[in-house]
Image: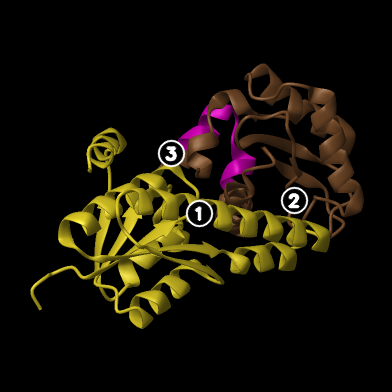
Chain colours: A yellow, B brown
Amino acid sequence: MDNPVERVLVYLDGSIESVTAARYAICLCRKLNAKLYGTFIINTHALNDLVKSRIFIESEQIEYKNDLEADADKYLRNFETEAVSKGLAPECIKESGLVNVKIKELVRSYEIDLFVIGELSRIRSRRDEFHNESERAMRSVPCSVLIVKDEDRVDDIYENLN
Amino acid sequence: MTLLEMINEDVIKVPLESNTKHDVFRELIEILHKAGKVKNTESVFDAVINRDNQMSTALENGIALPHAKTEEVNQLVLAIGVSPKGIDCDSHDGNLSHLFFLLLAPPDQSGPHIEALSEISRATKSNAFRRVLLSAQNAAEIVEFFCED
């Protein structure tokens, strides 16, 4: 193996941080000549929990699921557009379920060797850390993980990538 | 956006003054309005009541989680209120509601809205969490609790 990184997966969740992570992943893949994958995972597990807890009614579950489907399409489309504009041919993967479990499955099935995520939110406690899906994915994926920080710097690198 | 990022003393009321469900919704919305986070309070009230009319947002164990999507907020916002005496809000277990979490989200932020509701749901299942919030004497104590590592 000549290249230490051949397949990169970036996790998109609609946050600014995930957009920054995607841009950094685009830059990395260009420089390393690696294959780029982007995924948006619709957290149907959380939706189901809210219905079970009687916080959501059925019509809300359907409405929010439709919203998330639309978000997934939008953010994956934006990701694809940005990657293509930098000369890459990314693969977009829309999934649904429990986020950290789905990410682990994707890492295995696509033989990902670098998982890229955006900067993590502040947490209140160890309990929050346990429940934060990005944290759980970061800790449990079987490949190396890159947490992308410094949005301004990443934007500069991305914009200057010819 | 985590709960921690939405919480400050401006969006917390201890104790709540209201005695009825409708009044407490108005009181929490007014807190957000004064904090500059809500535009048209009547429109927000209608959205919250409309959702509550479909199924009470007063859960169990003294927790109420009124929520709605509305164009009247620019981002996900949360107001917290504590009513030591309790308010009858037609809760699922028939008990009075003491801890109120009003969550409002713009229509295009369903993802963060779901995450925040899940986070509140998980946190409020803890007896210790509920006990600490209920014993708070003022907003500062609640902020301090949320900011503890």
Q: Which of B135 and B116 is in front in this view?
A: B116
* Residue sitting at x 59%, y 23%: B10
Q: Nearer the viewer, residue B39 or A91?
A: A91
The magenta segment:
B132-145
Q: Which amino acid does label 1 sit on?
A: Arg
Q: Residue A77 carries which label?
A: 1
Disc 1 and disc 3 on one polypeptide chain: no
Q: Which amino acid does label 2 sit on?
A: Gly
Residue labelled with disc 2: B62
Label 2 chain ID: B
Label 1 chain ID: A
Magenta span includes B143? yes
* Residue sitting at x 24%, y 59%: A29
Q: Where is residue B132 in the image (x, y as percent from the top left)?
A: 56, 45
Give above or below for A45 relative to A123.
Answer: below
Q: What residue type is labelled 3?
A: Cys
| Number of the front mark, 1 or 3 | 1
Label 3 chain ID: B
Residue labelled with disc 3: B147
Magenta span includes B108? no
Asked whether residue B89 is in view, the answer is no
Rounded to the nearest whole Å, what is the CA distance between mark 1 and mark 2? 43 Å
Residue B45 shown left or right of residue A65 in the figure: right
User: Could you classify mark 3 by the number of other residues whose Cα lies within 10 Å: few (under 14), some (14-19), or many (20 or more)?
Assistant: some
| Number of the front mark, 1 or 2 | 1
Q: Give the secondary structure at mark 1.
A: helix
Q: Position of residue B2 (x, y in %)?
A: 50, 44
Disc 2 and disc 3 on one polypeptide chain: yes
Q: Give the secondary structure at mark 2.
A: loop
Q: Nearer the viewer, residue B125 or A156?
A: A156
